[in-house]
Image (cartoon, helix red, strand yellow):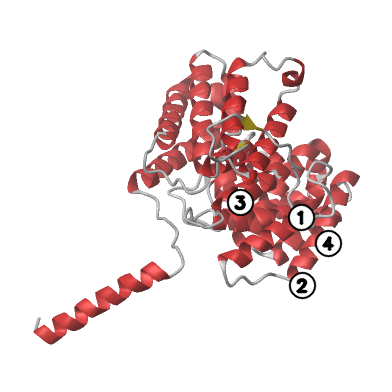
Amino acid sequence: MNLRTHFIFSFIIVLLVVVSCVSSPKKVAPEGAWINNMHRLSAAYLQLMPATGDPRAFGDKKNSETVESNIVQLAQGAAQAAHDPKAPAVDPIIAFTAARFAIDTKLTYAGYKSGDQQWARYALAHTGDYCISCHTRADNGAKDFALPWQPDVSALTQVQRVEFYLANRQYATASLEANKLAKDQAYVRLDPAGYQVALEKVMAMTVRVQKDPVAASSLAERMLENTETPNYIRREALEWLREIQIWQYRPGKYKTENDKFHAAVRLLENTRFPVLDRPKLALINNLRASGLLHELLENKNSAFYGELLFYAGLAEEALQSLNIYGLCQAYFEACIRKQPHSELSERCYGRLQESVRAANPFLGRDSEGDTMLALYLADLRHLSEIPNDPKLKGPFKFRELDSDPK
């Protein structure tokens, strides 16, 4: 390499470094160990989930060694993912879901070993909820890739097949199965709640991952064409169609992260129905807002990261039927720890406390009944409060704030 060529090559390298520094933040690529854990979990799930559809095969002694081995693989993979120091840490949903998944699979294995196969089978049939919660939050990661083998899902119900494909990022197949389910009159009569939740999960993927209002509209229309769809679900589907039409008319183009953030806030604030009234009626707007916020949370250096956590908590509170229980609380806690002793942290604490009390009705009657929970709230309350005088170290005074977003 001559001197002139060396100079040109060095200049190009410097130019690329400068451009990468001034351009918008890139998504952080997952570490190799994390990816390996995901493959390990996926392999165990692909084996276990179809087996849960047949209670006789699941409980057959000749299959016990294989079933137990796969549960062990699932539990070990979940534990390693939960304790992986290099796991993606930008969005609290990842650490929260990994920790809950690890606990759940450990309990499932203990139940199976103790002989409670009914509980183990039920728990395994719902492990896909953890995968779906993360895999449908935004357009991140692989999708519609070739599976290492073709699992036999013939023993699964229609709802279970939809969730199986969603959990494994087989979004196109999940959409096809969901449209079949939406038109199935016999199934909606048999299990209207399962029918509703499964289609909501597919709607979450369609809105947040595929960002396809045409496909979302088609799914809602299939639900309305089904003459056996209960009236309360029909009412929700009609409202979804109204919001999808607005989405098609104003799809939203965002030049900056600030534009995207304000669009998400407007979607949350402009819903026709309060979060605690009928959140399912505002499903599309809440999903659109949630998807935008999850995309923004990929940049932990954002100037308004604390506010992102607060609004993400509000969005997940409205979408709690689609989430792992307590997810909104994880966002409110992260908000407090990100921006302590501020008005924002006080607002986050107010929502957190409200959510915890709603989940534990006995806490209001016996605040000292759950000592660990009381200490947890006390610690976060202290962290959220604004001092009377910033120059003084104490005492702190809690200021009651309107918990609704402004």
Which residue shows up at 40% across the image and 30% down it?
76
Query: Which badge, 4 or 2, is on the more N-terminal residue?
Result: 4
Determine if residue 175 is in view.
no
Query: Which badge, 1 or 4, is on the more N-terminal residue?
Result: 4
Which residue shows up at 40% across the image and 55% down it?
29
Residue at the disc numbered 2 = 249
Q: Which amino acid type is shown beneath numbered disc 3? A: Glu
Image location (x, y in percent) of residue 215: 70, 63
Query: Which badge, 1 or 2, is on the more N-terminal residue?
Result: 2
**Quick one: quadrant of the N terminus?**
bottom left
Residue at the disc numbered 1 = 269
Residue at the disc numbered 4 = 242
Q: Height in image: 123 above or below 176?
A: above
Q: Secondary structure at mark 1?
A: helix
* Mark 4 vs mark 2, CA separation in Å: 11 Å
Between residues 33 and 316, which one lies in front from this camera angle?
A: 316
